Image (cartoon, grey):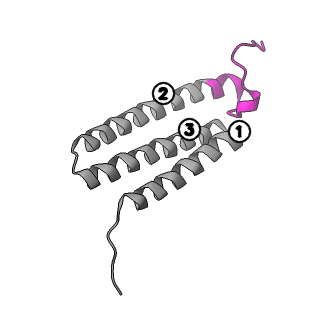
Amino acid sequence: MTLTQIGPSHFLVVAALLFGIGALGALLRRNALTLLMSVELMLNAANVVFLGYGKQYGAAGAHAIAFFVMAIAAAEAAVGLAILLGVFRTRQTVEMDELDALRDET
């Protein structure tokens, strides 16, 4: 049994699967928490591509870009969850179909 090296095509396949799952989750689900998790999956897919090509070409810049993408993802999650918490306190739901910020239902 021989072990093969992991090449850039393997990274691209994993990233495509992650991005596809994230895109399907963002398009098909109506829960805002699921939408945030789907966006996180898509950002992680971008990180996998950056790190795969960084490994192939020996570019340290890919690691720096991936670090910044993780920082942006963490900030997006924190702000998104804070907004959802505020919306849930006023509307008692996090379903995207029932949220309409332009209409005041008082």
Report which residue position mark 2 lands on: 79
Residue that badge 3 annotates: 36
Pick whichever of labels 3 and 1 is earlier in the sequence.
1
Tell me the element at label 3. helix
Identified at 56% across, 38% down, the residue is 36
Relative horizontal placement of residue 57, taking residue 14 as reference (left or right): left
As shown in the figure, which amino acid type bears the numbered disc 2? Val
Q: Amino acid at mark 3?
A: Leu
Dot placed on the residue nearer the N-terminal end, 1 or 2: 1
Residue under label 1, please give it.
30
With 37 as the anchor, is 56 left or right in this view? left
When the figure is inspected, residue 45 is found, relative to residue 78, above or below; the finding is: below
* Residue 93 on image: x %, y %: 71, 32
Q: Residues within 10 Å of mark 3 (few under 14, many from 20)?
A: some
- State which quadrant residue 62 falls in: top left
Corner quadrant of residue 8: bottom left
**Mark 3 → mark 1, Cα distance in angstroms:** 11 Å
Q: Position of residue 89 (x, y in %)?
A: 64, 25
Residue depicted at x 57% and y 46%: 22
Asked if labels 3 and 2 touch by Cβ distance under 8 angstroms, the answer is: no
Marks 3 & 1, CB-CB < 8 Å contact: no
Distance between mark 1 and mark 2 Cα atoms: 19 Å
Q: Amino acid at mark 1?
A: Arg
Q: CA distance from mark 2 to mark 3?
A: 11 Å
Residue interval drawn in magenta: 87-106
Quadrant in which the N terminus is drawn: bottom left
Of 30 and 22, the residue lying toward us:
22
Q: Residue at x 78, y 15 (%)?
A: 105
Q: Residues within 10 Å of mark 1 (few under 14, many from 20)?
A: some
Q: Residue furthest bottom?
A: 1
